[in-house]
C-alpha cells in the first residue's frame, strides 16, 4: 500500500466491504468496467458489499483486443455481475477522425467515453455513486510534480446533471496488491494473470490516426503475438506485452512483388508497479517466428521490430 504497510487481502476485503456499505447505504452505484483487473476487482468488491445495487457498464470503444468484448462480457456474466455491454465503436472512430496528436487522441477517447457512459448512466434509476478502479500509480503519475506525463483515462468529469459521489476502494493499492485482493475474491488465475491494458486501449498503440482499418491490422497482429506468447509458456512470465502499429511504412517483397506496407513493433516488459519497467529478453528464435507469422497472416504488414527500451526513459505505452 502507498503508506508502506503490508497488505492483508482478507482484512482488506472485510474492511472495504464494511466501508462501501456504510458509504453508499441503499443507493445505486454505477461502474465502468474495462475488462482489466482493476475495474473487475473493484466491481467484485462492491458486488460483495451491495449486490445488484451495483450496475456495471462495459463499453466497447472499438479499441479492445480481438474478440475481447464478447469474451470478457461472458466472463462478467459468469461472475454474477450486473453488467450491461454497450457497443459504441462508431462513436469513438468518429471522434478520433483526423486526430494524430497522442494527448488529443487520449482526450477524444476520454471525452467520448464520458458521453457514452453518461448516456447509459442516465438510464440507471437512482444512481448516486460512481465507482472507479483507480489505483495508486494512476494518482501518483497523474499528479507528478514533473507535470502531467500522460492524462490517464478514467470517468472523472461527468456532466453537471450526473453529480455522483466517488467510490474508489483500490486507490491506495499497487497492481500486485489488486491481484492479491482479486484472488481473495475468487477471481480465477487466467483472468487475474491478464496483462494490464490501458483504458484508451489500442488507441495508444496505434500511432497517428486511429481508423477502423488500422485498428483491425493492429488487433490481428496483437492476437498473433499474444497467442504465441501463451503457446510458448511465456505469457505468465511477462508483466505486459503489446503490439504497436507504427506510423511509418517500409519496403518489402511478397510473392516476388514490391510491397510498401506497415511496420509492427512488439513490446514486452517486466515491472512491479508500472513506475519503472525493464525489457524482457525474449528468445530470438521466438521473435523471428512471431515476425514471420505476423507478416504471413496479417494483410498490410511487411516488417516487425522489437522495442528494447526500458522505462525510464521510455514509457511502457508508445503514446
Ligand atoms: P506508461 O505508458 O505511462 O504506462 O508507462 C504505465 C502503465 O499504465 C498503463 N496505462 C494506462 N492505464 N489508462 C489506464 O487505465 C491510461 O490512460 C493508461 N495509460 C497507460 C499502461 O498500459 C501501463 O501498464
Image: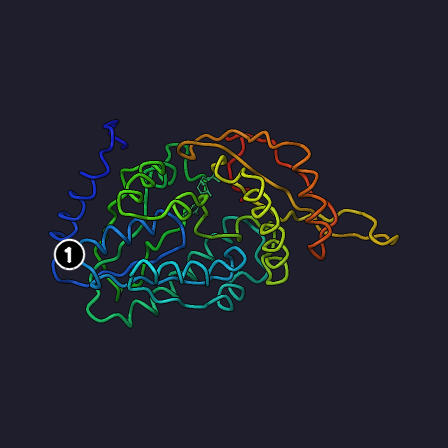
Residue at image position (26%, 27%) is 4
How many marks do you count on the picture?
Answer: 1
Residue 318 rendering spot, x and y as whole percentages: 55, 42
Quarter assignment of residue 272: top left
Residue 315 rendering spot, x and y as whole percentages: 51, 36
Residue 174 rendering spot, x and y as whole percentages: 33, 36
Quarter assignment of residue 230: top right
Q: Nearer the viewer, residue 90 or 53?
A: 53
Residue at image position (48%, 31%) is 277
Element type at marker 1? helix
Q: Residues within 10 Å of mark 1 (few under 14, many from 20)?
A: some
Q: Is residue 218 left or right of residue 251?
A: left
Residue at image position (66%, 46%) is 264
Q: Which residue is mark 1?
A: 24
Residue furthest to the right in view is 256
Residue furthest to the top in view is 4
Q: How is the image coloured?
A: rainbow
Label 1 CB less than 8 angstroms from ligand 1: no
Q: Nearer the viewer, residue 234 or 87?
A: 234
Indicate the quadrant of ligand 1 in the picture.
top left
Q: Is residue 178 above or below residue 282?
A: below
Quarter assignment of residue 111: bottom left
Quarter that holds the N terminus: top left
Residue at image position (81%, 53%) is 259
Q: Is residue 163 left or right of residue 146?
A: left
Q: Nearer the viewer, residue 50 or 162?
A: 50
Amino acid at each position: 500500500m502507498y503508506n508502506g504497510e503490508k497488505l492483508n487481502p482478507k482484512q482488506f476485503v472485510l474492511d472495504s466491504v464494511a466501508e462501501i456499505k456504510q458509504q453508499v447505504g441503499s443507493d445505486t452505484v454505477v461502474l465502468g468496467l474495462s475488462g482489466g483487473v482493476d475495474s473487475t476487482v473493484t466491481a467484485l468488491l462492491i458486488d460483495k458489499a451491495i449486490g445488484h445495487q451495483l450496475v456495471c457498464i462495459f463499453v466497447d470503444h472499438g479499441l479492445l483486443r480481438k474478440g475481447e468484448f464478447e469474451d470478457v462480457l461472458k466472463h462478467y456474466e459468469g461472475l454474477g455481475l450486473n453488467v450491461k455491454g454497450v457497443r459504441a465503436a462508431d462513436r469513438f472512430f468518429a471522434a478520433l477522425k483526423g486526430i494524430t496528436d497522442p494527448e488529443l487522441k487520449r482526450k477524444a477517447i476520454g471525452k467520448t467515453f464520458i458521453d457514452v457512459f453518461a448516456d447509459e448512466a442516465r438510464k440507471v434509476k437512482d444512481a448516486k455513486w460512481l465507482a472507479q478502479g483507480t489505483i495508486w500509480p494512476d494518482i501518483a503519475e497523474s499528479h507528478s510534480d514533473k507535470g502531467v506525463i500522460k492524462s490517464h483515462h478514467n470517468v472523472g468529469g461527468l456532466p453537471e446533471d450526473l453529480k455522483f459521489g466517488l467510490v474508489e476502494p483500490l486507490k491506495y493499492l499497487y497492481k500486485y496488491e489488486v491481484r492479491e485482493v482479486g484472488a481473495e475474491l475468487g477471481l480465477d488465475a487466467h483472468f487475474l494473470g491478464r496483462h494490464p491494458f490501458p483504458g484508451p486501449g489500442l488507441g495508444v498503440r496505434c500511432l497517428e490516426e486511429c481508423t477502423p482499418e488500422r485498428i483491425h491490422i493492429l488487433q490481428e497482429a496483437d492476437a498473433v503475438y499474444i497467442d504465441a506468447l501463451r503457446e510458448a509458456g511465456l505469457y505468465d512470465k511477462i508483466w505486459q506485452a503489446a503490439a504497436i502499429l507504427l506510423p511509418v511504412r517500409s519496403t518489402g517483397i511478397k510473392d516476388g512483388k514490391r510491397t510498401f506496407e506497415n511496420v509492427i513493433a512488439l513490446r514486452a516488459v517486466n515491472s512491479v508497479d508500472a513506475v519503472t519497467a525493464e525489457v524482457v529478453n525474449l528468445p530470438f528464435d521466438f521473435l523471428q517466428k512471431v515476425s514471420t507469422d505476423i507478416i504471413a497472416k496479417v494483410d498490410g504488414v511487411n516488417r516487425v521490430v522489437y522495442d528494447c527500451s526500458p522505462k525510464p526513459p521510455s514509457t511502457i505505452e508508445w503514446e
